[in-house]
Amino acid sequence: MALSKSPYRGTRDFFPNLKRERDWIFQHMEKSAKAYGYESYDGPLLEEVDLYLAKSGEELINDQIYSFTDRGERFVAIRPEMTPTLARMISQIHREVPKPIRWFSIPNLMRYEKPQRGRLREHWQLNCDIFGAPEGLGEAEILSLLVDVFLSLGATQKHFQLLINDRRVVDALFKNKMKLDEATIYKLYKIIDKSKKVTPEALGKMTSELNLSSENQQLFAEYLSLESFQAVVDFMKKCDQADSTTALVKFLEIAPSMNLMPYLTYDPTIVRGLDYYTGLVFEAFDLHPENKRALCGGGAYSSLLKIFNEEPVPGVGFGLGDVTLTDFLKTHQLMPDFSKPINDIFIACQEENGLHLVQSFAQELRRNNLQVVTALEPLKFKKVFNMAEKSGAHSVALMGSDEIANKTVVLKNLKTQTQETFSLDKISDCLAFILKSRG
Amino acid sequence: MALSKSPYRGTRDFFPNLKRERDWIFQHMEKSAKAYGYESYDGPLLEEVDLYLAKSGEELINDQIYSFTDRGERFVAIRPEMTPTLARMISQIHREVPKPIRWFSIPNLMRYEKPQRGRLREHWQLNCDIFGAPEGLGEAEILSLLVDVFLSLGATQKHFQLLINDRRVVDALFKNKMKLDEATIYKLYKIIDKSKKVTPEALGKMTSELNLSSENQQLFAEYLSLESFQAVVDFMKKCDQADSTTALVKFLEIAPSMNLMPYLTYDPTIVRGLDYYTGLVFEAFDLHPENKRALCGGGAYSSLLKIFNEEPVPGVGFGLGDVTLTDFLKTHQLMPDFSKPINDIFIACQEENGLHLVQSFAQELRRNNLQVVTALEPLKFKKVFNMAEKSGAHSVALMGSDEIANKTVVLKNLKTQTQETFSLDKISDCLAFILKSRG
């Protein structure tokens, strides 16, 4: 039986057109991160499973992770996320380097999932994190960087928004004001997390099962109806929990200087990973009616290094996956056409004895940083332009028998269709013509 | 017990300084490949083990591969090499696209190996392949591209050379001239492969065990003593096997036009993977006395698509790994200093009420494509320059209480130590000063 030509389920073959899309996205991610002085890092594809267990608990490990025992009896996994690797690396160096630490990475990750729109088994994810930043400032910088990634890809505030909440607000409400026990708080968080996906009736039913006092029921309902940052600040003040909004207020004070306000919306239903985030939490949300979904999540966390018995270093970060982002860009028609490569010039000759001239001319041009595609056999006139077009070249160099005899070349600008004959000695004249053809 | 902070055995944590080394290498690889019109592709991290079995046989699978059964009972492996994925992808599209097909990739790969100098479990590898090129021409182009990778990284012909052989020559000698059976040929290939690593006596002993006729012994010895392309052409002519050097001669005819000759050395001991290569084979070899080893291997192969029941498409390619290449660059002191990041400017203020000015000024500069690091809290004068230096910034922007009050900023060029005060409104003047500081 012949082998399958298909990629493994939930993964992608990046043929050159798809790779160019990915490269374009990654280049903009990298450029945005570097504009804020974030340094690129990377870690191993495999980590010991203990690392993920320590961070995420049993659930993820059992169901969604690619884990196996290696030939040396180590229980390892293909990285399903970058944060545990980041924590391990930061734990090695955080005492020696000046704060804040600003790092980014675009690793490939694998999760055992049922492939569906927006979810594949293999994906890439931009991870940006800042450690040791003052409260409110790190959050603003991370969100500003995230906004810049979207803007650099051509998106505007009509395409996406950032939904914001603060875990300290929710915690203060549940613990200090409503005085709920841990188990009830945990259930209430789960209800919040689901609140947008269910009907108001279903929400009411879930809440009623918790047997909250009528006062607490009213507080919870009031909380879920909060629609602005001012409203949440006022509400928490009314609850005698003004302290819980200090960091949020500091964030809101600096955000306008980073032009963040047009993208921010307060959303009481955003809570993110329960055991992980401890401060501001956020999601980037697609506003397209056909693709209403979270594109990215992140927030502030304080105890990341605890698993290494290290003192806490406050961090803020996000992960932006390539699968949902590509869907976002295509849904909004923001993805450029990458069906063809781009090259400077296609060089061909029409006689066998011109092949060495094609090659030496090509080498001269490459030394001048041009992208050069050569025909490796003599081509008929008609085929030259067909091949040149498919190579994505801006110009063509052609040598017929006369040109070969005279050591000259005909250069043609494929956009303007102008052409000129040059001596092969006059490289700088050729270069000028070819660079002009880039248009 | 605290978790281990070390990376999994045989893998690397790429802290920013190491990541900058890797990025620098990859950028030059990519630039060289694109200069020849090679298109970037990528494939999945996991493939079904059957794919590797079909290409490489049992040995690799049993000993060196990271294989496991997924939750859906598929027997899969983390890619140990890119060629099988490449073959699978090419088999999907080779009928539709014009030849030659020129592709490159820089995937991360994993092999279960004992970590040692030049060999790690996780590594990256530049793969360049051309399909459907005329004999000799594809080989020359691939080798020229490989040479350009080395040259772009600062290496010269005193640092490396390309050792060349042709499997058709060896096959013709063994089969047609010496008339050996398959089993003896296989053993003789193995002896050749080891010939440089053992003493002449050991070599003689291994060969004598094959019970070759005295005529064949002499032919084999004569073959192993060949030291130039002319010598091998003459020798094969003398053996009535001139046909076996046709492709080699065609390659040698075009090679000078690509400036290849200074890098090429004929080496009868290069044979590479036995079941795979069918034409020209080569190795890039480090000339440093302390690092004499192969940096890269490749060659021409004709039956790559056979495993998919597809008609053969001739290919030529190589794989250049990052571990040996990094050793090579460091041994020859060709690796630049990447200990510090590079940024355009470090911006700080000395009073709390200047933080929003720092941020809005930073945003203006980022919109103009600068890499900007900001201090997120007020800094004392002395600390500003210490932090700026560590951030790798070319210039510093500082706002004391006067500047904050007047909405001005002091810009300082860290190289020339010149400084000037600008109004924060005059962004284009600020930009001119900062760009000049890049030096």
Image (cartoon, coloured by chain):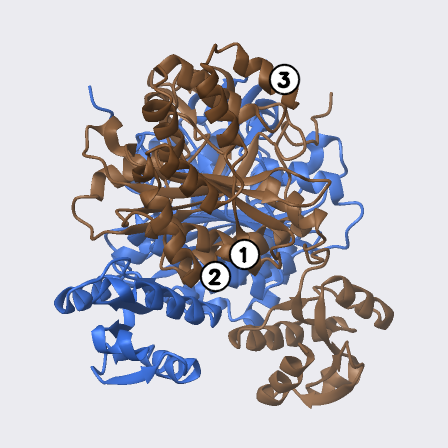
Chain colours: A brown, B blue
Position of A123 with respect to B91 (left or right) is left
**Image quarter hosting the N terminus of chain A:** top right
- At mark 2, the secondary structure is loop
How far apart in space, not on screen, are marks 1 and 3 (Cα)?
A: 33 Å
Q: Which residue is mark 1?
A: A262
Residue A46 lies, with reference to residue B30, above or below; the image says above
Residue A35 lies, with reference to residue A166, above or below; the image says below
Q: Are marks 2 and 1 in contact (CB under 8 Å)?
A: yes
Q: Which residue is mark 2?
A: A259
Residue A18 lies, with reference to residue B1, above or below; the image says below
Q: Where does residue A435 sit, x and y in percent of width and height?
A: 63, 80
Q: Nearer the viewer, residue B237 or B425?
A: B425
Q: Residue at x 40, y 19 (%)?
A: A185
Q: Where does residue A100 sit, x and y in percent of width and height?
A: 26, 51
Mark on residue B369?
none
Q: Nearer the viewer, residue B405 or B155?
A: B405
Residue type at mark 2 is: Asn
- At mark 3, the secondary structure is helix
Q: Where does residue B140 sit, x and y in percent of width and height?
A: 58, 61
Mark on residue A202?
3
